[in-house]
Image (cartoon, grey):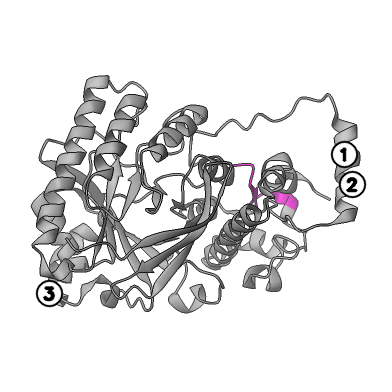
Amino acid sequence: MAGSRMKLELSRVVQGRSRLGVLKGLGRTGQHSLDVPGCLLYTHFGTVPHLTQDTLHTLSNLPSVTQITLSNIAEHQEVLGEFKDGFRKFAGLDDTVLYCSLHDPATSCPTGYTTNKTVSVWGSGGRIELTVAKFMALQRTVQPDWYQSMADGETRQNNTSRKRVRKSVDRTLTHLDECLLVHQKTQELEGVEVFGVVEGGDILEERVRSARETAKRPVAGFCLDGLQTGSMDHVLRSQLISAVTKELPEDKPRLLQGVGRPDEVLVCVEAGVDLFESFFPFQVTERGCALCFDFDISPDPERAVLELEKERETAGEPQQNGDLNEDQTQMTPFEMNLKDKRYQDDFRPLVEGCGCYCCKNHQRAYLHHLLVTNELLAGVLLMIHNTAHYHSFFGALREALAKDKLDLLKRRVLGERGGQAERKD
């Protein structure tokens, strides 16, 4: 395998962990880049849910990397094979980098279907069993710019035994070696990057072993798996990520799978994560909700005075502890439920000052009406706003790291959360 073109150039490392920089050399020709901390563009079969390509590109500052998943694509392998020109052209995607992951992060899949030789993905037609040969045949058909290696990720349940976790790490390393061997001999995958997968469940020693061994292989970056929302205590997750990232090279990116909530993103960036999957706006949209959390870190003297008064008023009161909501289908404190009757005569935009098409042209009352009448336009408008709001949050996160304002950003996102979603003012 030729040397990786993908390279992470760091401009700052804050408090020894949080990394600010640019991931360069993306795509077959290396002309694309991605700011980190950052996220990928989440899609179903190459399309952002609810949005056409034209509608999507009314949004600015979209990531240069589009995520597609084998769980969506595997059942269409025969058609893609006949098409012969790869998934990018098949889906009408232009000027984007394709990253192919194994599973859809917004959809939970059944466990108990892995063996020493196979893993399973779940498409609309049910379970599809993949050997390394079939997995790599899919990669040849899809022709992504980078892909996640095959992995046994079925150890995120809390009651998983140490023996099963060890087997997961061993299987994943074996899969990686086999994938790399096929990759090196496949002309269609020349210039394509491979990300190794770090497993290990909730066992520190296995996490470190997995990271250390994966880092020895010729991979362009790392996927941290089995740390999804609800899979373990958030303090333990942060400790495991910190231990893992110590074993990984500084100039290669770390992509965390299955984590999207803003509070969790902040904690994981502090532990050394660079990239996230942006499925969270889709989940919020499917709930009929709009993201509305605050991430404004621009100086505002009047606001500072008001916050100081608020702090004095609330001194001694119990504070929110930030416990995670383990069920990813449930509403979080970072969103407003527009199906609620309180919004039927609320004529404000979803978020004051938001520049997205939805907020500039429509009111909360209109979104409420669309939702209660089951109009398809509701999903379109909500997805426009939620996508714009989420990616703007990552822009604010990078700015906060550049300007030493990460603590201020955390106060904005965490300290006032729920207020905007619930207040009626």
Q: Looking at the image, how many numbered discs can be counted on the residues?
A: 3
Which is nearer the eye, 131 or 47?
131
* Residue drawn at point x = 50 percent, y = 59 percent: 21
Can see residue 23? yes
Rendered residue at 71%/61% (across/down):
365
Q: Are marks 1 and 2 in contact (CB under 8 Å)?
A: yes
**x then y, percent, for residue 54:** 47, 79
Tell me the SS state at disc 2.
Answer: helix
- In-image side of 343 versus 252 (left or right): right
Given residues 308 and 159, the one toward you in this image is: 308
Q: What crowding class fits label 1: few (fewer than 14 Cα within 10 Å), some (14-19), or many (20 or more)?
A: few
Instruction: Identify the amino acid type marked 3.
Output: Glu
Q: What is the number of the mark on residue 306?
A: 2
Residue at mark 3 to residue at mark 2: CA–CA distance: 63 Å
Of the numbered discs in the image, which one, if any, rests on residue 310?
1
Look at label 2 and name its amino acid: Leu
Residue hosting label 3: 82
Q: Distance between the residues labelled 3 and 1?
A: 64 Å
Left/right of residue 38 with respect to residue 134 in the rendered view: right
Specify start and end residues of the magenta stretch as a single range: 331-342
Q: 10 Å neighbourhood of mark 2: few (<14), some, or many (≥20)? A: few
* Residue 307 position (above or below residue 94): above
Q: Earlier in the sequence, mark 3 or mark 1?
A: 3
213 up-or-down from 352: above or below: above
Closer to the observer: label 3 or label 2? 2
Q: How crowded is mark 3: few (under 14 residues within 10 Å), some or many (20 or more)?
A: few
